[in-house]
Amino acid sequence: MTRALSLVLYVCCVACARPAVRRDAVETPTKPFDEPAAATAPVPDAPYSTKPVAARLTLVHLSDSEAGLLPDPAQPKAGGLARTRALIAALVERAKGQALVLHGGDSFIPAPELSVEVDKRSALLAGNDLLFVAASGLGNHEFDLGESFVAEAIKGAAFPYVTATIDVKAGPLRAALGDAAAGTPWAHDVKGKLVPRVKLCTAMLVDGKCPGLVVGVVGSTTEQLRVLSRGASANLAVPADLAGVRAAVQAQVDALTAEGITVIVLISHLQGIGRDLELAKQLRDVDVVLSAGGENRLAAERHRLLPGDVVDRACVALGEPCYPAARVGADGKPVLLVAGAGDLRYVGNLSVGFDEDGVLVSVDAEASRPWPVDELSLLELSTTADGAALAFQARVVDALAPLLATVAESDVWLEGTREEVRNRQTNLGDLSADSILWAARAARPDVLAALRNGGGIRAPIGRLDPSTWVKRGGPIRLIDVQAALRFDGPLVVVDTTHGALVRTLESALRGAGSGKGHFPQASAGVLLRYTTDAPEQTHVLDGGKVTAVRCQGARVRDLVITPIGGAPIVLAKDGKVSTPDAKIAVATLEYLANGGDGWFPGEAHLTVTAIPGGTEQAALRGFLAAEEAAGRWRRGVGYIDADDARARITPVDGAGVTVPPGCP
């Protein structure tokens, strides 16, 4: 093995809101897994056709690959482009010419692999072109670096991006638009374009005609786009709510059926299987929904998963087999939903049969499953990691070599995995918030605390023991900092009030316990006690912004901030704010101060001041260097995860909660 290839095992860290709606639209309180109650009941006897199978289709799918270009250093025999490419190729070959490869969106994200170039093209974008993708949905993370970047990324892609729910009014994306007005284009004719729908053929076209099965593909992007991604501007019009999403999708589906296309797949990037379940039952003539954005690890209990992974919690409500989940559409016909985890850790394989009218007849239960991207799967499929992709990975590793410089050493695993940092206080959340406070106080000594969202932390820092899977510390390198804090958001100071800060934390605690990215992380000196046994905050939204708070929420029980060298300041006690108009200065991310993730909801009197040169990554690097120089870092001993003695954010029971006016 060459030096470059061996570095693949170590170079990259483990990679692991709210809608723009019509005036007076009310944000619905979050259910577990973001799943509407009406959609939770399993459908034991979906109304499959009793006619003979006239055509078969294997849908090979992946989504939320984000920056999973290189193998996971914690699981060196799993993940990576070379294994994924080989796995997809083997599944397509096994389907004997009846397979299509689709991507659910979030095909890239700000990351070191997106920044470095191979042959004058972003390594991450070039890697996507090697995955045999015929069409991709458009997620929210594609917009994180702005519309110009996503426009160039689309124009350079070897496949089209598909969405029916973004109307490009102006701006750089207009140059990437394809045309479906004269009829649904074949996907290969609009590669490098953004279109609302495409059609695919399971065989090679002969004189422009498909001798196999014609499949229509429609895309939908979350209506929360302009809040979830700071790079999406007013150039982009999105539906007001889920009803608007349904209408936009149905219009494109109807256009396909009018052309005689009877097998239709929806690539739906609505941030979770729950919303797609609700959408699916409202649509006509959709056969399969590829749900993306929520990284729901749908699987049956019998399916093998990667070590340490478990079947998604949503499967408790969905019932067996869970992959695929079966539901009934508005036309009374069956519709199947599939989803999978991201970061090139899984590839889904759905094998189904259709009758002569394009109605689902059957699901091949043995062939339909999520495939872990690992050596065991390749062995089962009698293949090996793709040689050309291995060589490509080696070039990426060489390009990333300057980022292997060590910033600090840690004996502690710094927890930033998605499931943890979005549901509880973690030590990496602590460390990031402390570094933001440190950077802010250098410019504004009156800043008392720092708050940030867990969803902006994208990876842990550390190493898993390959034999025991015990989490261990290790060197904190530049690449680890970049992987964990991929958005590298600018830092700001917010001058606000006690009441507004409590309202912000009420907003941050919406859906607490169900993996929401707006879950808070706090700096030292902050004590937040909250309950989920109380109403959560709901918003009135207009044009993608929170204009008012409908239900204040009652989840914040106690909020106390003890500034460095000062006495405790009680902002809330037993759910009551004693001095709501008292002033306070806190540090946070510019994205959150501007209403991202629903923070600072409807607050019209904030003063937001930029911290000169302050970004998430620069703050963490500077803080670690300062702590090391002062002798306080001690290889991370002060940041042991889940240490009750250092609890900053603690769930408590809801005894004694008073329901505020306007709350359910």
Image (cartoon, rainbow, N blue to C red):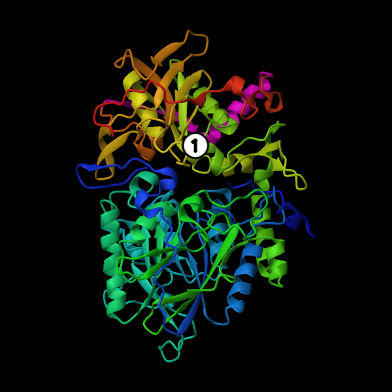
Q: Give the range drawn in magenta.
A: 605-631
Front in this rendered view, residue 458 or 380: 380
Residue 427 in the image, given as x and y percentages of width and height = 59, 30
Q: In which quarter of the image is residue 498?
A: top left
Horizontal side of residue 14 vs 173, given as left or right: right
Residue 623 inside the magenta-drawn segment: yes
Residue 90 in the image, given as x and y percentages of width and height = 63, 73
Horizontal side of residue 455 vs 219, given as left or right: right
> Residue sitting at 44 percent across and 49 percent down?
145
Residue 292 versus residue 182 in the image, above or below: above
Residue named by callout 1: 454
> Residue sitting at 49 percent across and 37 percent down?
454
Front in this rendered view, residue 552 or 47: 47
Residue 408 inside the magenta-drawn segment: no
Horizontal side of residue 584 vs 107, given as left or right: left
Residue 528 versus residue 420 in the image, above or below: above
Q: Which amino acid does label 1 sit on?
A: Gly
> Residue sitting at 63 percent across and 46 percent down?
14
